Each structure stands twice: as structure tokens, then as C-alpha cells.
């Protein structure tokens, strides 16, 4: 995954820190240091696995059913909300454009809480590649 330097979608770089601080206040969390800012997180929600990546819509997939049930291959899931910011913590908070830019029809509240899964942090230098 190519990981960009910190940004907020559709916000001028000169205004990003102020907007990010506003989002943090909305979530009731402190503003993370640049090295702690989250670009993407994968998390479980109602039997599905979802990925929230800043600047992208939410994508997910169903998980295989439990033991003793007929196997069904994972099915893709999509949500129209675009991720604007992700804040680390317990729980983690994800801010989307749902409601902020009109009702995009998301199944997720805004902001919504999730548990920690796989995390990619923003690069704080030239773009980096993580695995």
C-alpha cells in the first residue's frame, strides 16, 4: 500500500490542521502527533470486515460463516461514505462525509467507533510503502 503524507480530502493543506483539530474535538479525543495519524484501518462490524481509508469510500466483505454451517465465499460490501479522518484510541473514531456533506446513505454513524484492526499510518516524510 502506498501511504501518502497527512491530508484531509478536499481541504486545502493550509487549513488541514485546523479542520483535523475540529474533527478531534468532535470525537472528544486529543489531536494525535503527526507520527500517530492514521491513514487506514481494518475492523470488524456485524460479522463483516471493513476497511476505512482516508480519501476513499468504505469497503468491506462478509466473513465466512462459523463451524458447521454451509460455506459461503466472502461477498464484497460497499458504503458510500468517504473517510475524512481516523483517530487512534480505545475505541478508534472514524469521521466520514456522511451528514457533513449531505446524507450519502451510509450505514455508519458519523463519527463512528470501531475496534483496532490492521492500521497504516500516514507517512511523515516522502511517500512510503507498507505491507
Image (cartoon, rainbow, N blue to C red):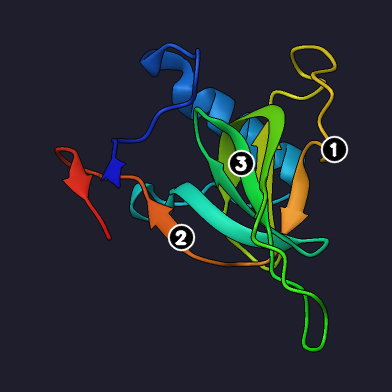
Q: CA distance from mark 3 to mark 2?
A: 15 Å
**Residue 92 image point, x, y percent:** 66, 58
- Label pair 1/2, CB-CB below 8 angstroms: no
- Label pair 1/3, CB-CB below 8 angstroms: no
| Residue most extreme to the left | 126
Q: Residue at x 25, y 44 (%)?
A: 124
The answer to which of 34 and 82 lies nearer the viewer is: 82
Secondary structure of the residue carrying numbered label 1:
loop
Secondary structure of the residue carrying numbered label 2:
strand
Q: Is residue 102 above or below residue 63?
A: above
Q: Residues within 10 Å of mark 2 (few under 14, many from 20)?
A: some
The answer to which of 87 and 60 lies nearer the viewer is: 60
Q: CA distance from mark 1 to mark 2?
A: 22 Å
Of badges 1 and 2, the one in the foreground is 1
Q: Residues within 10 Å of mark 1 (few under 14, many from 20)?
A: few
Q: Which residue is mark 2?
A: 119
Q: Which residue is mark 1?
A: 107
The answer to which of 49 and 39 lies nearer the viewer is: 49
Q: Residue at x 25, y 56 (%)?
A: 130
Q: Which residue is mark 3?
A: 59
Q: Quadrant of the C terminus?
A: bottom left
Of badges 3 and 2, the one in the foreground is 3
* Residue 117 numbered mark, or none: none
**Residue 87 image point, x, y percent:** 58, 50
Amino acid at each position: 500500500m502506498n501511504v501518502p503524507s497527512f491530508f484531509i480530502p478536499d481541504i486545502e493543506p493550509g487549513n488541514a490542521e485546523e479542520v483535523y483539530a475540529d474533527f478531534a474535538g468532535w470525537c472528544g479525543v486529543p489531536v494525535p502527533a503527526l507520527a500517530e495519524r492514521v491513514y487506514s484501518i481494518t475492523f470488524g462490524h456485524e460479522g463483516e470486515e471493513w476497511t476505512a481509508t482516508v480519501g476513499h469510500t468504505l469497503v468491506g466483505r462478509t466473513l465466512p460463516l462459523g463451524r458447521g454451517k454451509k460455506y459461503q465465499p466472502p461477498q464484497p460490501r460497499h458504503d458510500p461514505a468517504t473517510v475524512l479522518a481516523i483517530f487512534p484510541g480505545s475505541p478508534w473514531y472514524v469521521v466520514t462525509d456522511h451528514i457533513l456533506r449531505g446524507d450519502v446513505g451510509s450505514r455508519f454513524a458519523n463519527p463512528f467507533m470501531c475496534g483496532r484492526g490492521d492500521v497504516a499510518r500516514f507517512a511523515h516524510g516522502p511517500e512510503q510503502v507498507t505491507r
